Amino acid sequence: MSHHEVLAAVANGTHVLLCGHSNTERGYLPTLRTKLLEELKTETDFAEAASLEVEVSQTDADPLEIV
């Protein structure tokens, strides 16, 4: 939401909670990793599946910073 959209919503008595696109998805990544590995194992032969790795970054962060 833009700044003015938030102001209009608040003026109309609406509560606004902005979580941020990047941060709301980051918590789901471990679940996505598991599901992706399961899917890859069903779509590939066993030898190929055994060598596959799916990693979730430990250093990735939201590109926006609140100052």
Image (cartoon, rainbow, N blue to C red):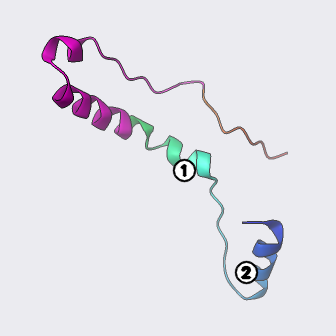
Q: CA distance from mark 2 to mark 1?
A: 22 Å
* Foreground residue among 36 and 25: 36
Disc 2 residue type (three-letter): Ala
What's the residue at 76%, 73% (across, down)?
6
The magenta segment is 31-59
Q: Residue 46 appears at what percent x and percent y? A: 14, 16
What's the residue at 82%, 67% (across, down)?
3
Kindly indicate the quadrant of the structure image that contains residue 30: top left
User: In the rendered view, does 17 fall on the left or right side of 4?
Assistant: left
Kindly indicate the quadrant of the structure image that contains residue 44: top left
User: In the rendered view, does 26 fall on the left or right side of 64?
Assistant: left
Q: Secondary structure at mark 1?
A: helix
What's the residue at 31%, 34% (across, down)?
36
Looking at marks 2 and 1 on the same chain, the residue that comes earlier in the sequence is marked by 2
User: In the rendered view, does 48 fall on the left or right side of 26?
Assistant: left
Disc 1 residue type (three-letter): Thr
Q: Is residue 66 above or below residue 55?
A: below
Dominant SS of magenta comes to helix
User: In the rendered view, does 10 fall on the left or right side of 35?
Assistant: right
Kindly indicate the quadrant of the structure image that contains residue 42: top left
Q: Residue 18 appears at what percent x and percent y? A: 66, 62
Categorize mark 1 by other alpha carbons within 10 Å: few (<14), some (14-19), many (20+): few
Q: Is residue 36 above or below residue 50?
A: below
What's the residue at 85%, 45% (across, down)?
67
Instruction: Indicate yes or no whether the magenta region holds residue 50.
Output: yes
Q: Is residue 6 above or below residue 22?
A: below
Q: Which residue is mark 2?
A: 9
Instruction: Indicate yes or no whether the magenta region holds residue 44.
Output: yes
* Foreground residue among 16 and 44: 44
Number of numbered tags placed on the structure image: 2
Q: Which mark is residue 24?
A: 1
